[in-house]
């Protein structure tokens, strides 16, 4: 059995865990402000050009966005189940749930990649391959600019999250976590849930615009 | 006289415990990281100062002539970018803050030492990027990067500079995250929230502002950089974009940014004044509420940079009201510092001289801030030298004076040496004089109507410009002097005792310089932060130690 | 009365601002004197070598703290109300005697009088009249500043700005750009020449302008094809422009807006952002096709279509 010793600046392992938890929540607050600023800008422009934005959004691949939402929400579930299993000391089950999380996340990225290629062929990629359809005005390109910035940033965060979950899977395998201390795993779980939450905002904002 | 041989014979402290370059560049000791930061920001201070020197030399003559117009424009842009992001914002938090936060609360290190080291490297990467942008040809958009000038009409290295600012933001966020978590979770036994020194409260408030504001700047500069790189129109009117939206987002960060610069300074002053007046700070609770109030209300005033930009009259009036309200807690702090002096036992070493200078200069800056917060007056004064004078009074007369106050106050603790007191007092006096001569004429220039960012100006304004430039030369001397006598003290000066100022903080209850893990045994706190006795001149330290 | 260092002001706005500035200056000096005075007194009286009575020093005093907080708050609120009042008055243009059109571009100011007279970096106006400026930018953000009038307004591309002043004294005054706009920002200056109304009328007639702004605008209205849909004989269902300027317009999203300069400009350049109720969003955008100067001329023409010929 591994003996867990806290880092030198901490008095107890429990303190180390508390610090990790507070740290991730503070970090997530900064992420909320970061994505929040982007969402605020998008909402402002959508309010100024409602018709153009709705018309442009009609060309997003709705099924891609929906499938991705399902995949991501499910992955949050599998992540939590993995942490639960780890807490209960059931290492093998935990690894399986974490692996499922990774697979679902990879699925998300796969669908996203397919979607980007489809967008390219649809000619809605600003600066690379964009045409105005009949009756479309410049704000339509603005919609697509936001679409790509938002989804690309989200994808970057997802990729980082996948790396972290992979690393946590390895550590769970190695037996680093017990019911007394599993703070790093919970921290990654919180991060993963945040990435999921961002998609919950982006999906209606980008895909359901004008489709109600 | 001491020498390196003597140094090696000293008890182990964080400076002499390890000697290799690797032990410095890969350190996780918050004290060493503070010194690494100190080296970086000092370099940037002199780069920004060099730009200012060229500007003031150029403006001695109305027709200019020292610099070409494009070069002049790049100079004031460089001055702003470097001074704001690479000197003022990191100065007190990343140097004094990194060094003192664990010591003042009785901890061994910060919560995340490796993130602390990473933040210094990220800072340097962003610094290298901005220096590259400057030396490759410079940026000519002003430090405010207003669109569409910065997106479509400038031909400098704006994109590189914007990405540098983006990355610099991560450094700030890492430091702020560290401070918030450390103060919450790593205080020594007995160190309750209301026994925390005001410097800690100030850094805590600063960190909250950093955490919430910096990501908005990150998104804003990212959007502008993308607009430049991809040729898409996010803030471009032709594509349905809105230049005013950029201003709103930029100032939503940049106004809290000025509170990021001044709150730590206020924290330093709140440490220095009680110690040199031998008296507890007046109204401790009020001071903590004032700090938090400034942090919160500071998020609600950004529109006062846009009174003439075309925002609605209603929103302008609201922003003006909020701007007046944010001045109230600042006023409370000034009154409390003044009241602390009443019935004190005051001595006038350099830290105290800088602190008293701070109160005067900050008050002038703050009061002139009221003038520009008055929306009607701002119609006349916006974008004139009046605004320049106002913000230099608070940022340079205020924050930089406080930085020097803190540097001198904690110099014995950081280096284990005493600086030369007379030279330091002369430098403090010269700085006060030089500063006022530089910037007071600019208030007059502003009301007369001289605009900002003009490389040439009407001849009848020359006398004020000459006075200002003369003051700048005195100020330059005052800034260079510490470089000499402080460096000299590292090798030649007397060694410092653990508590040469007989102060009450926990940082003074350990050796000067401290050992690598700060305290031989975790201290227990039994006293409040400022138990000074002005009748006797003595005090009780926070761990109970008595000084007669 | 001559005050040292005090710049002269020559417009009604100047008087308002001077009074307010003086008052605030006095308040600042008083507060500063109080703080400085107390610091000096305390530092001298309580320096470490003196033996004055230091017994019972106060560490907090609710009376003092609430006292100076309230006093500060009251003083600040008084100044705020005064300033806000003045700001509203200064930035909400009254009914104007004369309306001029300004285009700012790197790095000059182009001014057009309704009679078609043009000037560069100069602005001739009659004394004592309320002058209203309608301003546009061709490229980046500029700012139109007349220090002697204590008035400025930014000129932001993509929207129209308005500003007003009423000169009180003839003379020549400095005009400056005060929003950094590139290399020659410092040379984007000019003169405002205030003349007696008679001299102004004479100056106007000597400018050799052939067509009024509205007439030039009518020409452009036809050239760009606007009359094809909005003209009297058009078969296309498009809103009538007669009497439009200044009237209330009902939009298809249920809201109502006033058809001011900005509305008209946005209708030309971003027609789908505000569609009139009962009409289809079929108007093409002229964004990027019409210069700011031409847009202002078309605006002048549409303004002239009001039966009374005046702004409401």
Image (cartoon, coloured by chain):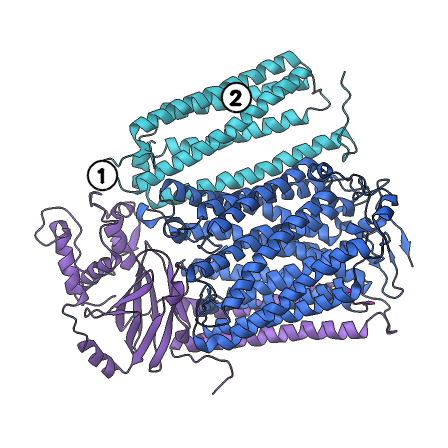
Chain colours: A cyan, B blue, C purple
Quadrant of residue B230 in the image? top left
Q: Secondary structure at mark 2?
A: helix
Q: Can you say whether B521 is above or below C162 in the image?
A: above
Residue C206 in the image, given as x and y percentages of width and height = 18, 78
Observer-nearest residue: C283 or C280? C283
For label 1, the crowd category at 10 Å Cα-Cα, with few meaning under 14, some 14 to 19 and many 20 or more, is: few
Q: Quadrant of the N terminus of chain A?
A: top right
Q: Main secondary structure of the magenta part?
A: loop
In the foreground, B529 or B221:
B221
Q: Is residue B275 left or right of residue B156?
A: right
Please name the residue that numbered disc 1 is placed on: A135
Dot 1 or dot 2: first in sequence order is 2
Q: Distance between the Cα atoms at labels 1 and 2?
A: 41 Å
Q: Quadrant of residue C135?
A: bottom left
Chain of the residue that carries numbered disc 1 in the rendered image: A
Q: Position of residue C11 (x, y in %)?
A: 38, 77
- The residue tagged 2 is A75
Label 2 chain ID: A
């Amino acid at each position: 059995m591994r003996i867990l010793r806290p880092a030198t600046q901490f008095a107890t392992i429990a303190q180390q865990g508390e610090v990790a938890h507070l740290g991730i929540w503070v970090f997530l607050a900064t992420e909320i402000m970061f994505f929040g600023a982007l969402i605020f800008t998008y909402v402002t422009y959508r309010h100024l050009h409602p018709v153009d934005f709705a018309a442009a959004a009609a060309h997003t691949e709705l099924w891609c966005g929906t499938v991705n939402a399902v995949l991501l929400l499910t992955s949050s579930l599998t992540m939590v189940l993995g942490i639960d299993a780890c807490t209960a000391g059931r290492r093998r089950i935990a690894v399986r749930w974490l692996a499922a999380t990774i697979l679902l996340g990879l699925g998300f990225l796969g669908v996203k990649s397919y979607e980007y290629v489809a967008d390219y062929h649809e000619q809605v990629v600003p600066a690379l391959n964009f045409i105005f359809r009949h009756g479309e005005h410049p704000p339509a390109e603005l919609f697509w600019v936001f679409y790509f910035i938002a989804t690309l940033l989200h994808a970057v965060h997802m990729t980082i999250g996948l790396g972290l979950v992979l690393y946590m899977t390895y550590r769970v395998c190695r037996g680093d976590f017990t019911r007394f201390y599993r703070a790093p795993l919970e921290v990654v779980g919180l991060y993963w849930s945040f990435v999921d939450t961002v998609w919950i905002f982006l999906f209606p904002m980008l895909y359901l615009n004008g489709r109600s | 006289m001491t020498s390196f041989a003597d140094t090696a014979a000293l008890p182990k402290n964080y400076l002499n415990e390890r000697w290799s370059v690797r032990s410095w560049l890969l350190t996780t000791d918050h004290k060493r990281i503070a010194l690494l930061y100190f080296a970086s920001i000092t370099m940037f201070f002199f780069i920004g100062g060099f730009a200012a020197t060229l500007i003031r030399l150029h403006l001695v003559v109305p027709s200019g002539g020292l610099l070409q117009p494009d070069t002049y424009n790049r100079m004031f842009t460089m001055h702003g970018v470097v001074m704001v992001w690479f000197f003022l914002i990191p100065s007190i938090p990343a140097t004094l803050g990194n060094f003192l936060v664990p010591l003042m609360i009785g901890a061994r290190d910060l919560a995340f030492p490796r993130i602390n080291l990473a933040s210094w490297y990220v800072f340097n990467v962003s610094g290298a990027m901005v220096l590259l942008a400057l030396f490759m040809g410079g940026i000519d958009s002003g430090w405010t990067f207003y669109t569409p000038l910065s997106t479509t009409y400038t031909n400098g290295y704006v994109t590189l500079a914007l990405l540098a600012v983006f990355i610099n933001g991560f450094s700030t966020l890492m430091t702020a995250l560290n401070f918030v978590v450390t103060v919450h979770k790593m205080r020594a036994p007995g160190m309750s929230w209301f026994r925390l020194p005001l410097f800690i409260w100030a850094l805590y408030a600063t960190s909250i502002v950093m955490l919430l504001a910096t990501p908005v700047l990150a998104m804003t500069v990212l959007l502008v950089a993308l607009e430049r790189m991809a040729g898409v129109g996010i803030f471009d009117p032709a594509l349905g974009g809105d230049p005013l939206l950029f201003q709103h987002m930029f100032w939503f960060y940049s106004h809290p940014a000025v509170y990021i610069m001044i709150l730590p300074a206020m924290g330093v002053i709140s440490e220095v004044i009680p110690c040199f007046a031998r008296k507890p700070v007046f109204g401790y609770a009020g001071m903590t509420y004032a700090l938090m109030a400034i942090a919160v209300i500071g998020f609600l005033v950004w529109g006062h940079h846009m009174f003439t930009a075309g925002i609605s009259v209603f929103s302008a009036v609201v922003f003006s009201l909020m701007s007046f309200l944010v001045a109230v807690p600042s006023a409370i702090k000034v009154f409390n510092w003044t009241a602390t002096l009443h019935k004190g036992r005051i001595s006038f070493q350099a830290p105290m001289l800088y602190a008293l200078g701070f109160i005067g200069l900050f008050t002038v800056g703050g009061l002139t801030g009221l003038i520009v917060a008055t929306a009607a007056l701002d119609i006349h004064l916006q974008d004139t030298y009046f605004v320049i004078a106002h913000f230099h009074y608070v940022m340079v007369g205020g924050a930089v004076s406080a930085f020097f106050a803190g540097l001198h106050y904690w110099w014995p603790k950081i280096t284990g040496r005493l600086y030369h007191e007379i030279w330091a007092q002369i430098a403090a006096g010269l700085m006060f004089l030089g500063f006022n001569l530089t910037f007071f004429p600019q208030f007059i220039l502003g009301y007369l109507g001289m605009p900002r960012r003009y490389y040439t100006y009407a001849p009848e304004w020359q006398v004020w410009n000459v006075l200002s430039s003369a003051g700048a030369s005195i100020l330059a001397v005052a800034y260079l002097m510490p470089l000499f006598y402080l460096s000299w003290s590292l090798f030649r000066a007397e060694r410092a005792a653990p508590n040469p100022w007989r102060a009450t903080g926990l940082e003074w209850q350990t050796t000067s310089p401290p050992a690598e893990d700060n305290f031989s045994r975790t201290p227990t706190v039994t006293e409040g932060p400022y138990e000074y006795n002005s009748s006797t001149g003595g005090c009780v330290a926070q761990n109970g130690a008595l000084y007669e | 009365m001559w005050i040292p260092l005090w710049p002269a002001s020559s417009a009604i706005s100047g008087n308002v601002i001077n009074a307010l500035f003086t008052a605030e200056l006095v308040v600042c000096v008083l507060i500063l004197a109080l703080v400085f005075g107390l610091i000096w007194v305390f530092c001298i009286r309580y320096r470490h070598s003196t033996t004055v009575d230091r017994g019972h020093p106060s560490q907090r005093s609710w009376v003092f703290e609430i006292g100076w907080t309230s006093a500060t708050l009251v003083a600040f609120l008084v100044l705020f109300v005064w300033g806000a009042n003045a700001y509203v008055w200064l930035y909400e243009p009254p009914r104007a005697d004369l309306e001029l059109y300004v285009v700012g571009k790197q790095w000059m100011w182009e001014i057009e009088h309704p009679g078609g007279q043009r000037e560069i970096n100069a602005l001739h106006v009659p004394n004592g009249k309320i002058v209203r400026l309608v301003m546009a930018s061709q490229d980046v953000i500029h700012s139109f500043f007349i220090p002697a009038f204590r008035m400025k307004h930014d000129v932001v591309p993509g929207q129209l700005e308005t500003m007003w002043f009423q000169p009180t004294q003839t003379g020549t005054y400095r005009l400056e750009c005060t929003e950094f706009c590139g290399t020659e920002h410092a040379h984007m200056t000019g003169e405002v020449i205030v003349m007696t109304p008679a001299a102004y009328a004479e100056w106007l007639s000597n400018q050799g302008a052939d067509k009024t702004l509205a007439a030039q605008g009518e020409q452009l209205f036809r050239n760009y094809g606007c009359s094809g849909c909005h003209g009297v004989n058009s078969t296309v269902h498009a809103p009538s422009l007669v009497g439009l300027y200044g009237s209330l317009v009902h939009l298809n999203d249920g809201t109502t807006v006033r058809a001011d300069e900005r509305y008209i400009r946005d209708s030309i350049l971003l027609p789908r952002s505000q569609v009139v109720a009962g009409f289809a969003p079929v108007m093409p955008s002229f964004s990027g096709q019409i210069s700011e100067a031409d847009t202002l001329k078309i605006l002048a023409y549409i303004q002239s279509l009001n039966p009374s010929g005046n702004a409401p």
